[in-house]
Image (cartoon, rainbow, N blue to C red):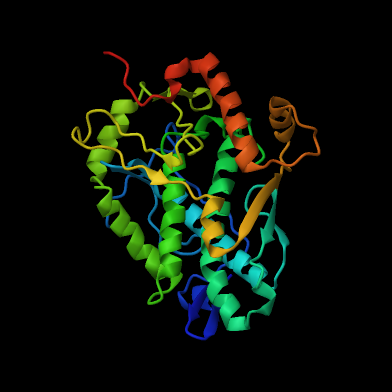
Amino acid sequence: MCIFRYSGTAVLLLSAAFLAAGCGKPCKLHERIGSFFGSPYGIEFPDSGRMGKHCYNGGYDECNGMVYTCKGGFIDIAHVRESADRTAYLAELTFQNLMMERTEFSFQIIEPAHYYVKIQYPPNWAGLGFDEKAAQAEPVAVLLGQYLAQKTTVWHEIITWFGFASTGVFSEQVSSFSWEDPYSDLMGTDLAVMAMEDTRHSYEDAMTSLLNEQLVALDAQTAEISKNAMEIIENQWYTTKVHFLIRMFKRNFDIGTDDGYITPWLVPGICPDATPLPKPVPNLELLKPLGFCAELEIEPKELEKYEIFNALGLESHARIRPEVHFPGIMEFIKKEAYKIYTPEVELPKLKPL
């Protein structure tokens, strides 16, 4: 894995970037173990400013856990880091394919699903020199990498709602669309874009600083206040009486398909004067001013695909197109959730005491 850097007339493929940082990892990404409400192992609440060093694909120098912020609600640091690394990986993969002038490429990342990307180039692309192509390919790769990464995180939430288990044993439905996940994932992709655009520091060093800066901007709270926020929603948004019978009364189904933004959930009573800070969801329209067009298709490999296809009325060999099919999938999921929990499942309110 290497994060590209373009400077003047030379493309610097920094293939040793991660090894030099002391965190050498294989290109294949793996899922970070994050916190989740109702975990039988408890939740870590690190103090903001003590997040440790970001390490591509994970490492012992990282400090993860749940941090409560006044403007972003709960932030799952492991989710932030994993989605950032997804973005960096996919931006680099996209850059390499653009430089090879491929109109199609595919990838698989963490989940079993296979992803297929189609690209249309500007009319003059073939006549450009290497340096000119690299200069134009870099911002396209960053934008497309963020888009692809964010959609893979949404796909993860979708398949876990239908019962997918990363370990192959226990369903992760209990943590699907948890109130902190969509915003934390999107935040990670944003930070990765800024880290890749930082020409003065390595990706990992930039991510380390940017994560701390973002938490400050969101008004991160102490570990004590984060624990207090958890205590307020316990037995309100979820119950932890028996781990395998955890009831999640609230779910954040906001993936940005309605207004183009994901809005975080704030816990009532914590930071009472705060307002949530929505983040824009990456979209393919941003490529058009750069002269490119792209399309993403998902070929599910998870067993849960049959229920998803049935919900959409698709044949079992079909591919999922996020722009076309994600809204329909979300409507199906919401209807199921309404039957189980009532429509208030997607409202960040507390029940009257």
Quadrant where the image shows the C terminus: top left
Quarter the N terminus occupies: bottom right
Q: Position of residue 238 (x, y in %)?
A: 41, 24
Residue at 70% from the left image edge and 71% from the top image edge: 101
The answer to whether any part of residue 15 appears in the image is no
Q: Residue at x 46, y 17 (%)?
A: 343
Image position of 81 with respect to 41: above or below: below
* Residue displayed at 45% across by 68% down: 196
- Could you tell whether 38 is left or right of 220 in the image? right
Nearest the camera: 198 or 240? 198
Quadrant hosting residue 60: bottom left
Residue 335 image point, x, y percent: 56, 20
Q: Is residue 316 visible?
A: yes
- Taking the view exactly as shown, the residue that stands out farthest to the bottom is 9
Q: Position of residue 255 (x, y in %)?
A: 49, 38
Q: Position of residue 123 (x, y in %)?
A: 67, 68
Instruction: Indicate left or right for 275 with 74 as reference.
Output: left
In the foreground, 39 or 281: 281
Whether 287 is drawn above or below 257: the answer is: below
How many dots with numbers?
A: 0
| Residue 99 as seen in the image, left or right of residue 316 | left
State the residue lying farthest toward the front: 123
Q: Quadrant of residue 105?
A: bottom right
